[in-house]
Each structure stands twice: as structure tokens, then as C-alpha cells.
Image: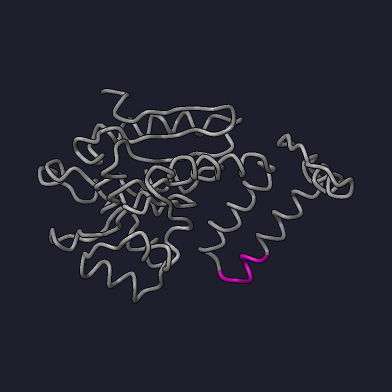
Amino acid sequence: MTLSIVTLEQTSLFAILRLNCPEKLNALSNEMFAVLNEHLDHIESDRNLRALIITGEGDRAFCSGTEIAELHDAAVGTTISERGQQLCGRIESLPVPVIAAINGIAAGGGFELALACHLRVASSSATFSVPEIKLGLIPAYGGTQRLTRELGAGPALEMMLTGRSMTSDEALRLGLVSRVVQPSELMSEATSLAKEISELSPLSIRACLEAVIKGLELPLGEGLKLETELFSSLFETEDAREGTLAFLEKRKPVFKGR
């Protein structure tokens, strides 16, 4: 197994996870799945991490999806689907914001990987698709669920049933991405966003992620109860006291995650 097929770069507060197989459009091979999970083991145990950026190497693709040759040779569809769902679930469940910096093609499982990220920034050259219908299949890494939650049933079904590709401008208009920039500006935009988030309270960020991700699966009343519980749990933290005091003293707060 070659760890360089996915690289992990770390700064003092945030990390960059880079799919590094541009000659195959950063396709999700068996090896890439294994290395991604190894890196996630490390990321999950890093208590100092404040944000994570996921991107692809090169200027052609973020991730073109599952390696088709391996998909064709696979004997059990359940194993393939559950492996992809587990990886995307790990990303979505990380206690720090995950930013997808989408530098090109995001197709199939690659698009589903991006959908599992909390925030998405795209290059103007990026494209998005779930073309599995053209293979006689359906999205199986969570795409039927996450894309529908993002767009609503009608637009999501149109993407899935036609397999057509969406431009970055369309994705911005529909809210699939929050920012579109020139290719040369993509990583500076993503790192600027990661730095901005990293300066805020990690405890409130973690609580906000939990409220939104878990709340999406709950009836409104239960979601509101979860919100109250999380808000209350923050009320006695040092970060909350520092934030309110800094506001009153008209200075920038210094959050310590306590």
C-alpha cells in the first residue's frame, strides 16, 4: 500500500487531505479507500485540529468516482456500497468542519464524497454528476440520500435519472457549493475559509455541526430539543465566557477549546 496515493499536509490548526492519483483522475481505488481510512484514523485522534480540507491533485479532477475496473470485477455490491457509505459517514461525522475544494470533475462516488463534506468551494472548471445510471447502477455511497436532502427530490432525481453533468455555476445557484473561484484561487480560498473557522471556538463549532447533522434526521421538535441541550452545554465553558467578555471589552476573543 502506497501512502502517497493520498497525502496529508498539516498546519498548526487545519489539515489538507489530497487525493493523489491524477493520472486516473483521482479515482477511488481499493488502495485509495484503505489509505483514506488510515488518514482518517489519525485525523479523528487529533484534538488540536480545527478544520480539514479535502481536494484532488492536478487540475482535471477532484475525484472521478470509483475505479470502474475494480467495480466490474467486484462480486458483492453490498460490500462496495457499505464501504463507500462508511467512508462518507466518517467524513460527515468528523467533529471539525470539512471543506471540499473541488478542483475539477466530481463524478459518482467522487461527488458523493464531496456531498459528505460540510462545506464546498469549487473551481470555475469543476463539474458535478452522478452518472451511475449510465452503468446500469445507482449512486450507492449515500448520494441518493444526501443529494436529495441538498436539492429536494425533483432536482436530485433529474441529476440521477439523466446522469448529466452540472457546471460550477449551476451548483452555486442551487446551493451545492457556497463559493466558485478561478482555478488558480481555489486553494487560497479554501485555506482562507479554514483559517477563518479555525480562529473560532472549537467547542461551539463541534456543537453546531452536531446540531445540524443530527438534527436533519430528527423531527423538528426533537431537533429543537437537541439545539437547546447543546446550547446549554456550552454556556458554562471557558470559551463562552471568553467570547462574551471579549465582545463587551470590544476585543478579539482568544478561544482555547475549554
238 left or right of 137 in image = right
Q: Residue at x 66, y 66 (%)?
A: 224
Q: Is residue 97 above or below residue 157?
A: above
Q: Is residue 164 above or below residue 201?
A: below
Say how many tags the image has: 0
Q: Residue at x 31, y 47 (%)?
A: 84
Q: Position of residue 57 (x, y in %)?
A: 32, 36
Q: Residue at x 42, y 48 (%)?
A: 89
Span colored in magenta? 219-224
Quadrant where the C terminus is found in the figure = top right
Q: Position of residue 216 (x, y in %)?
A: 52, 63
Classify residue 163 by image quadrant: bottom left
Classify residue 155 by image quadrant: bottom left
Quadrant where the N terminus is found in the figure = top left
Classify residue 87 by image quadrant: top left
3 left or right of 41 in image = left
Q: Residue at x 69, y 42 (%)?
A: 201
Q: Is residue 63 above or below residue 215?
A: above
Q: Position of residue 94 (x, y in %)?
A: 51, 43
> Does 97 lie within the magenta span?
no
- Return the residue nearer the eye: 229 or 197: 197
